[in-house]
Image (tube, helix red, strand yellow):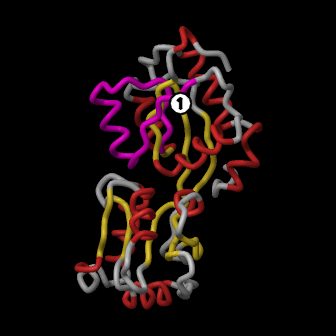
Amino acid sequence: MSQANGQPIRVLCAGAAQGLINALKEKSLIASEVQLDCRFGAVGAMREALLAGEPCDVMIVTSSMIQELLQAGHLRRGSESALGNVSTGIAVPSGDPWPDISTADALKMALLAASGIYFPDPQRATAGIHFASVLSRIGIAEIVGSRLRTFPNGATAMRELAAGSEASAIGCTQVTEIITAPGVDCVGILPEGCGLSTTYSAAVACKAHQPESAQAFVRLVAGPATEALRRTLGFDGT
């Protein structure tokens, strides 16, 4: 993967893929001469940044949003490639007992017993939007309202969950964000009837300053060379 003029490849990336990008750097799978300028956050925030004109070479968000942005002419058609599917899961601080979340009723009881419930932005984050709907669906949104702790993205929610002093706290976000967060354990995915599996994809922005380098990065992050790593970090095959 070459890089034009020594300029960084600018990436707007959903938090669900942040651990993957960091792992690519740590494992030296990205050439040393290639520099990345990454902004991570909720999917909705990344969309807002692109539409506001923030410099971007590569966009990594949900596949549905990639398609929306392709159709609107913000991303290059034919440049897109799927990284894989990511499930939404439940986390607890490392060392805490794992609650039973095997059924919707068990999840409901676990959430009712929690002193604090940590999750990402219920307006702009994929996992946050879904989890807020789950709370309503199982009939406890109002009951646990005072115990909800929301944050701009899943990584921040997990960091605060790990650092918090609340006994019996619980969290919910994409499993890729749980697996890569220090200080929390991934209890498992949301049970049947409450679950969500989201496909994430990467694509090159129409206004990319270095489209060839950007396309090479998309091939790396979504291609066979990193498939095993993606699976380790919580991505399932598409």
Q: Which secondary structure lies at badge 1?
A: strand
Residue 94 vs residue 145: left or right?
right
Q: Position of residue 212 (x, y in %)?
A: 59, 15
Q: Quadrant of residue 161?
A: bottom left
Across and down, in percent, residue 2 comes to 65, 16
The image shows a total of numbered marks equal to 1
Residue 15 is inside the magenta segment: no
Region of the chain picked out in magenta, as a range: 35-61
Q: Residues within 10 Å of mark 1 (few under 14, many from 20)?
A: many
Asked where in the image residue 122 lies, by quadrant, the reply is: bottom left
**Side of 112 relative to 107 (left or right):** left
The percent coordinates of residue 66 (x first, y second) are 47, 37
- Three-letter code for the amino acid on which mark 1 is drawn: Ala
Relative vertical location of residue 42 with respect to residue 2 in this rendering, above or below: below
Residue at horizontal 30%, vertical 37%?
48
Where is 1 relative to 113, above or below?
above
Q: Residue at x 53, y 30 (%)?
A: 203
The residue where tag 1 is placed is 203
Residue 121 position (above or below residue 78): below
**Furthest residue to the top?**
5
Q: Residue at x 53, y 87 (%)?
A: 99
